[in-house]
Image (spheres, rainbow, N blue to C red):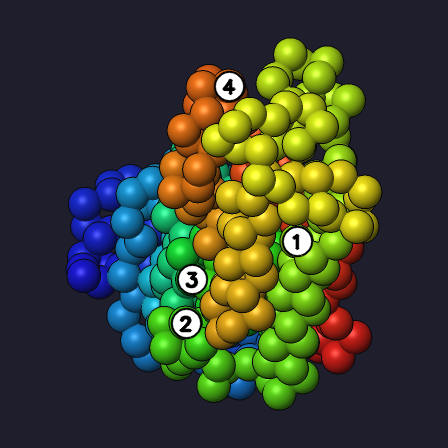
Amino acid sequence: MESLEAACDNLTPSPLTVLASLKVNIAPAVIATTMSTSTVSYDLFHSYPGSPSSGASNTLANEPFDDEGADIIIRTADGTDFMVYKFILARASPFFKKMFSIPQPPGADEIPHLIPVAEDEKTIDTILRICYPDSNPPFDDTQAELVMEAGRKYDIGVVEAYFKAGVISLASSQPVKAYGLAYRGNLKEEAQAAAAFSLRFSLQELLVKEGSQFQHLPGMAIRGLVHYHIQCRDAAYKVVDDWSWITQDRRRDEDHGVPNRWWFQDDHSNLACRSSVLLPAVGRWVHVWLKKFTDDLKLSIAMPGTPLGQLDTCVAIMTAFLAGTASQCQVCREAAGAGVPQAHAALLNAIHNAQSKVKLDLTQMPL
Ligand SMILES: [Zn+2]
């Protein structure tokens, strides 16, 4: 990293050269007496102790924040200077828009205004890249909370949107970490979404897979997640147990021309598949293989498995069909190609519907 003075040697004539000649590396209180009052108007030093840049040599930020044509300098706590265009910041942030609207003395715009900030180089680099029209930087979950905090401090809406999208993206692979980011950031929708993603894993799997993340969660946040899993498991079990899914969406499927519920004895029965079981809850006879599949599914849901059981794909239900005597029936074989995935989709949809009504308890979420 080169020093500000060294950087300035290569930028002649440049605004930095002007600043260097005015000795802007000194403390803000001194700046107030030696520079125009415009610099003091933008001074954010009061928000943190000391004057980090005092006596230190500053370095110039990486591209595109080394642009000598820019009209403000943001100086980070660890001494990096970002050359930034005012209008980009003002467009992204009502905070900066208001700051820049403060009337300045004549001639003050001839040099870039210096804005010292409390954040470090990495945080400022990230939020500025989000504000700039180029593509956003990759979501870094180790830095995300500092970025979010700075985004809120400076009232930059696009940073909040970036954080929310990053949390959702992270949730598919690391739901507990994503849940923690959302919980600590007071983002209810994202916390609920991360919890829903966590249902792909059992609680036991989460404790192993993301064990270290639990130490960063408040006790009530852990309780909320565990209770949510239990309620979702119970909701899934109830759907499978009461067979309500088997008659749902039937009209919609028929409208789409999908072969429908051929596994009902009264819809179709052949020598090979006529062995059926009565479902008192719906008053229908269903082929044995489907009853056996749902019995096994209930067991897997009730045991320390995932709240969805083995339903990620329709492999399990197709295997159950092929293992049953119905697979020897010509009519069943012809119907199964479309009908088994239809059964899987109907069951999964009914479970998702039931689980979507389970609300995560976020009443203790910090404001
Ligand atoms: Zn049959």
Residue 162 x %, y %? 53, 48
Q: Earlier in the sequence, mark 3 or mark 2?
A: 3
Query: Which badge, 3 or 1, comes first in the chain's sequence?
Result: 3
Instruction: Give the alpha-carbon distance from disc 3 to disc 2, as whole Å.
Output: 12 Å
| Residues tagged 4 and 1 counted as in contact (Cβ below 8 A) | no
In the picture of the structure, the residue carrying the numbered disc 3 is 174
Q: Nearer the viewer, mark 3 or mark 4?
A: 4
The answer to whether any part of residue 31 appears in the image is no
Q: Are marks 3 and 4 in contact (CB under 8 Å)?
A: no
- At x 44%, y 76%, the residue is 204
Disc 4 target residue? 331
Residue 205: image tag: 2
Q: Nearer the viewer, mark 2 or mark 4?
A: 4
Question: Residue under circle 1?
Answer: 240
Residue 346 seen in render: yes
Tell me the kind of residue under disc 1: Val
Question: Hey, which quadrant is residue 60 in on the image?
Answer: bottom left
Query: For this rendering, which residue is in front, 255 or 364?
Result: 255
Amino acid marked by disc 3: Gln
